[in-house]
Image (tube, coloured by chain):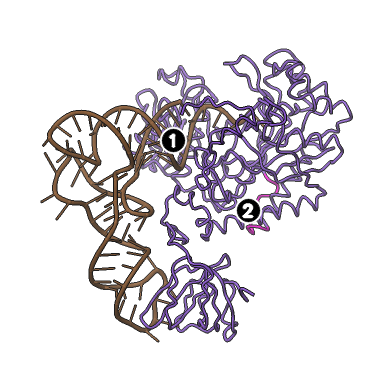
Amino acid sequence: MYRTNTCGELRLADAGKKVTLAGWVQKARKLGGMTFIDLRDRYGITQLVTEDDPGVGREWVIQITGEVVERQSKNPKMPTGDIEVKIEKVNVLNKAQTPPFTIEENSDGGEDLRAKYRYLDLRRAPLQRALALRHRLAQEIRTYLDQQGFMEIETPYLIKSTPEGARDFVVPSRMNPGTFYALPQSPQTFKQLLMVAGYDRYFQIVRCFRDEDLRADRQPEFTQIDCEMSFVEQEDVLNTFEGMMRQMFKNALGVEIANPIPRMSWYDAMDKYGSDKPDIRFGMEIHEVSELVKGCGFSVFDGSEYIGAIAATGCAEYTRKQIDELTEWVKRPQVGAKGLVYIKYNSDGSVKSSVDKFYTPEQVKAVAEAAGAKEGDLVLIMCGPKRKTQTQLGVLRIEMGNRLGYRDPSVFAPLWIVDFPLLEWSEEDQRFYAMHHPFTAPKPEHEQWFYSDRKEDLERVCANAYDFVLNGTELGGGSIRIHEAQMQSRMFDVLGISKEDAEYKFGFIINAFKFGAPPHGGLAFGFDRVCALFGGQETIRDYIAFPKNNQGRDVMIDSPSKIDQVQMDELFLASTVKE
RNA sequence: GGUGCGGUAGUUCAGCUGGUUAGAAUGCCGGCCUGUCACGCCGGAGGUCGAGGGUUCGAGUCCCUUCCGCACCGCCA
């Protein structure tokens, strides 16, 4: 037996016991005649003490036997801080090179270095907590969905490329020269086929692949909680997964979330928050003030389609320098605003704005109040095309929320966004795109517009779709699907996908729908993001054991990498990369 | 594809308008230390300043090219 106990479990009550522990040497502190060693495993750290210096180095793997004794000087910061183990025998199981960075709560290593030695970084407590949370959440999901009658069914990874949407990762087929599998961007079509097959409650915690550029919250391979249900309406789906989220929060974090989870239409989200994934932990809503400011001779406003404002609480004391800095901030290409108009609504009730020469103090005050400002607030105004300006105000709102400390990661404000437009018109391509995906059904009451040929009708069709949003992050989304072949071909028509094209890309599902497809719908959550948000982080990398870097590379195993000519030939591949 | 920031000791960083032998902290090695837990004290080793080119009497510092990392925009139905 390598060990009788872990390094995290011994307490004062264990004093007197003879134990054997095994683990990694976190640190050895030599004090002349005696040496303290911190021994670490994933359960904790236990202090060892000896009068002989065993000569062990950091990260050596050792096994020791000794007696648990009460410490002379206790450490209240450690769970095991009341005891130590008096070493009787040391057995070095494996020596170790000095690690390139410290294996501690806050490592001294940079991100690149830690990525290269991911197996060392994973020894650190924050990473171990992150993966433990991920495990806990996965267990909660499986338990809940199992209780609700869902079956976990695996779907294939080697599938067919469907060039709508994200770029596919492709895999060459050796047995079928010149053809390629694609890795799934999601198991979307398979889960719908499972509904046709009668598995009326399906789920899968499943890897998905998208060959697009990475972000802090985006990896080329990521994990979805993928779900689908038959004989349901939107309400059933929302209730089922609201229950799942509630249970996850309660059991993994001990947090009670809002009941019921509030719902907001996509149009309200855009109008009030300038985002389809609003952070509702704080107010500071966007207010349109066009009617109040137009026609007073300020040409910038007069020529704008939309003028909107937010009220930054308590910021009336901002200096000219701070406001200039904020103006520069919104003018950066990432935001893209033309400028920023401000109103200081001073605590004495007076107002001061950057457009005072165009408006009376009464008018300025009216605008401030329309923006929801109280005395002491700073009103920030932007103008331009409606949706674009709202989006910019939304970005500014989030930034001000950050600056004012309104975005506490330990506060959780979930939200359903509903009533999305079904279709989005692309001026560039002069065609409609599915806002969600081409299997999303229109709301039943909007079906007459869906079959209309007028662009205005099609634009106002709402989808039977919904997104789950938490603290300004989209964690998941789904829809009620089209289950009739006729409506599906109408959708392909609207999207300008030819019969031949639809047959080539989606023939299997159109065909399946001819054989008795039940009404169905579902959704998928981004599991990595769920984990990160539950853990209070914005980056998902710490919640993935072996993530990729910004360039999609795994610097530890050095992938992707070249393959030799034999492999290339076998797969009928020719390189066009210049050496 | 684009924007910004960064690359200097094992590690994290400082290094001013170009000017002696490139520094600090930490880690590492050695010595002292019996209650440490960020132990303390003394000493030591440790550098292709990401790479290549250019300007200059002289480049870590300025210019060009390039590679790498992070964040963001585009992209992600």
In the figure, the shade used to draw chain B is brown
The residue drawn where x is 38% and y is 35% is A351
Q: Is residue A471 above or below residue A172?
A: below
Q: Which chain is purple?
A: A
Residue at 74%, 52% in the rendered image: A142
Magenta segment: A251-261
Q: Is residue A260 magenta?
A: yes
A350 and A153: which is toward the camera: A153
Q: Residue furthest bottom?
A: A16
What residue type is disc 1 on? Answer: Val
Q: Residues within 10 Å of mark 2 (few under 14, many from 20)?
A: many
The amino acid marked with disc number 2 is Arg
Magenta stretch: dominant secondary structure: loop
Residue bearing the label numbered 1? A379
Chain where mark 2 sits: A
User: Mark 2 or mark 1: which is in front?
Assistant: 2
